[in-house]
């Protein structure tokens, strides 16, 4: 399946430019809007890790400590956790940092999609969360490592022809997530919805 674009000779010019090609269920979106309450500030969803049982995850995941530090330095945003496999220690730090956490309420990608539909921007590593958010046409900022990136992100672009609402934040050197997060923090104040 992943070789299909090469087989049918897809080029950047022939990639369909749909902003959103999937939609969450309206009742589920309404439920999440009720849980989130009245919007008073920019809502930022965050996910820092992919599947932990894959070898590539060690290279493409951002250390939780760096994510927690970014959140703590930016309390002016309503941070929403999209990482479903947080441990007790991480959950406690997120709660102390004012992050909206909904343990036990996300059971499927449909639940995640409905929550993402209520957010202003999603910040995620290259994972199911980032692909889902971009497929929904939501502003999606994808944190990419230096060397183990998926072919869909190319190597020299800050955007994605596959997902018009995605913005790519690449490591300038291997393992340098600090620069990626600093750049994201510089962009967040300029983001408008």
Image (cartoon, rainbow, N blue to C red):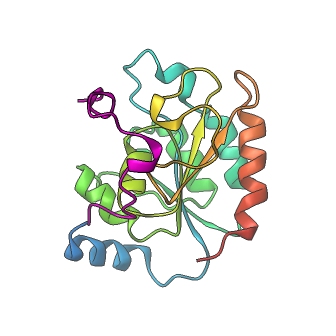
Q: Quadrant of residue 111?
A: bottom left
Q: Is residue 66 above or below residue 46?
A: above
Q: Position of residue 11 (x, y in %)?
A: 42, 40
Q: Position of residue 69 (x, y in %)?
A: 72, 45
Q: Is residue 185 above or below residue 51?
A: below
Which residue, as the protein is rendered here, is positioned at the far top?
55
Number of marks present in the image shown = 0
Q: Can residue 74 be seen in the rendering of this structure? A: no
Q: Quadrant of residue 33?
A: bottom left
Q: Position of residue 169 (x, y in %)?
A: 65, 43
Q: Position of residue 53 (x, y in %)?
A: 37, 20
Residue drawn at 76 percent across, 31 percent down = 172
Q: Which residue is nearer to you in this view: 50 or 156? A: 156
Residue drawn at 61 percent across, 20 percent down = 147
Highlighted magenta segment, given as a residue range:
1-23
Taken as a whole, is the magenta stretch helix, strand or loop? loop
Residue drawn at 69 percent across, 38 percent down = 66
Q: Residue 9 colored magenta?
A: yes
């Amino acid at each position: 399946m992943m070789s299909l674009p090469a087989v049918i000779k897809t080029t950047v010019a022939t990639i369909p430019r749909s902003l959103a090609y999937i939609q969450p269920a309206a009742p589920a979106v309404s439920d999440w809007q009720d849980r989130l309450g009245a919007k008073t500030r920019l809502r930022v969803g965050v996910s820092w890790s992919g599947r932990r049982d894959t070898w590539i995850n060690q290279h493409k995941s951002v250390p939780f400590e760096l994510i927690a530090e970014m959140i703590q330095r930016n309390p002016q945003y309503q941070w929403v956790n999209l990482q479903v496999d947080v441990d007790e220690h991480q959950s406690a730090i997120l709660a102390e940092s004012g992050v909206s956490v909904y343990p036990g309420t996300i059971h499927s990608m449909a639940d995640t999609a409905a929550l993402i539909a209520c957010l202003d921007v999603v910040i995620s590593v290259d994972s199911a969360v980032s692909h889902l958010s971009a497929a929904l046409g939501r502003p999606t900022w994808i944190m990419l490592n230096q060397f183990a990136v998926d072919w869909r992100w190319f190597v020299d672009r800050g955007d994605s022809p596959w997902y018009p609402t995605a913005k790519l934040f690449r490591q300038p050197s291997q393992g340098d997530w600090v620069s990626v997060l600093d750049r994201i923090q510089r962009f967040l104040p300029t983001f408008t919805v």
